Image (cartoon, grey):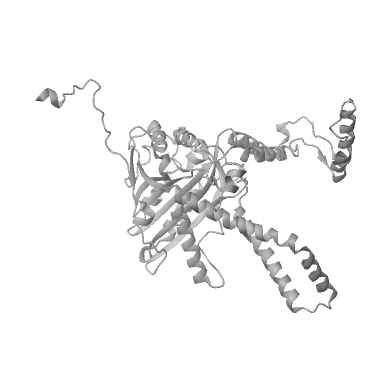
Amino acid sequence: MLLKNTDPRHKTTIILGGITVLLLILVITMMFINGDIVFFSVLQDTFKNLWWVILPIPVWKIFYLVWEEYIDLMWAVATPRITLEIIPPADTEKGPKIMEQIFHGLHTQSSLNKFEIYCGWRTNQDKFSFEIASHEGSVHFYINCPATTRNNVEAQIYAQYPDTEIFQVEDYVWSHTPKNLPNVEWDVWGTTLKLVSEDQLPIRTHKHFKEEITGVMIDPLSSLTEVMSAIGKDQHVWFQIVFTPLHERDWHPQSMDYINKLIGKGESEKTKKSFFGYLGEFFVLPGNILRGMLVEEAELIAPEMGSTEEIVKNDFNINKLSPDEQERVKAVYENISKIAFGTTMRFVYTGKRDGFNKALGVAGVMGAIKQFGDTNLNALYPDPRSKTFALYGFTDSRLAFRQRRVVQNFRDRSFSQGKFVFNIEELATVYHFPDMSVKSPNVSRVDAKKGSAPANLPIEFESSLQ
């Protein structure tokens, strides 16, 4: 469902646009071209006789796109969201692994069925946005979530980080910057991130961030938080991960097909039939039913007519694969062993133009993100369709449009572009609370623990004092 690195709505829009252009050309042709030309005469007759077959396709597409946007808007209006700031303890010794349990606890809902989607009963699952933001060098951790899920979010975090402090705060994407970005004083650079390869291949996860000699874990987020801490006055960096639960049936079959393709087993050992094979099944079925009515054993499975490929039953030996292929097979099996989320990831760098420093706010952040890449498996990179640049033709207006769009998508916690699949190990790698090895003084932390009152503390009631 979400395994392709292209946005389904984007593809649908392109197809719909092509159909619309063809229909316009057809209508103009019918109106202005002389019917004496045989080709156009046949075209006119075809459209006049089959318009009731041709037109419903684009009309349905237009209606479905509008309906989908409408029910998404109604869902958003009916589901108010809040922003929580998470202040982790300064002396925590817990690594990214513990963060997997928090994501596991948020994977609580079932996947949507067709009736819920098309009828608008439940068009979206609860989506969560885990964010890291730097306000003039001060690094903060935020979670934007539906108000109804606040208790669950806090419970999952307190269960793993008891000394953490959580506060509901004003949404920083509106309070720290002007509402109209970009403008004369403020510049913007932003992008949605996408995967280099197929979703089935994982990125470099936290278990591979270890020093070879001592075995000490290297915090994967240390580079990102250091870059964020280094930006100056009136400069802001926002990093966002929006995700929603995925059911296993939405991505496991594609992963198994990918493994079968790697090991040369074809389409999951299914027999491929030609058109005549399926046609033979159609004509054999009535005879089987008739024999069943005559108390004969019905052969409900047709003979192999027109088979083009036999079922592959060869014994598989992983040693026949190259080392790179063996690593991919192992990585995909490990990837599907954990639950996953449909994910969108983006970051925005904005600030006043006189101090705007792309060498730090853009190149520095992307360099920190590239450390999650594995050249044999997968990596994150900027999606060209969302990146804020324009090289030719109306560059100023196109650049401003892209900048406004990426900022609006960030503020809306949009889930309509750049979807891919991340399991909880991958999510914990790119978002977790830094441990005590991260020495950056600009990361917001709890310096002193809050002590609880003793269980045997005597309590005097007002009535006893009178």
Residue 52 is situated, as x and y percent measured from the top left of the image, at 74, 61
Q: Is residue 140 left or right of residue 206?
A: left
> Which residue in the rendered view is the most extreme toward the front?
293
Q: Is residue 160 visible?
A: yes
Q: Quadrant of residue 421?
A: top right
- Indicate whether 19 appears above or below 281: below
The quadrant holding residue 268 is: top right
Q: In percent of the image, x 85 and y 44: which residue is there?
A: 274
Image quadrant where residue 61 sits: bottom right
In the rendered view, would you say 73 is above or below 158?
Answer: below
- Nearer to the camera, 291 or 418: 291
Q: Is residue 143 above or below residue 458?
A: below
Q: Position of residue 80 (x, y in %)?
A: 42, 48
- The answer to whether residue 307 of the structure is visible from this angle is no
User: Residue 237 or 253: which is nearer the viewer?
Assistant: 253
Count of numbered labels shown in the rendering = 0
Quadrant location of the N terminus in the rendered image: top right
Question: Residue 381, position in %: x, y?
Answer: 54, 52
Tell me the quarter of the image containing the C terminus.
Answer: top left
Asked if residue 460 lies left or right of residue 88, the reply is left
Left-right relation of 54 to 214: right
Residue pictured at 59% horizontal, 56% vertical: 65
* Residue 247 spot, x, y in % from top left: 58, 38
Residue at the top extreme?
Answer: 456
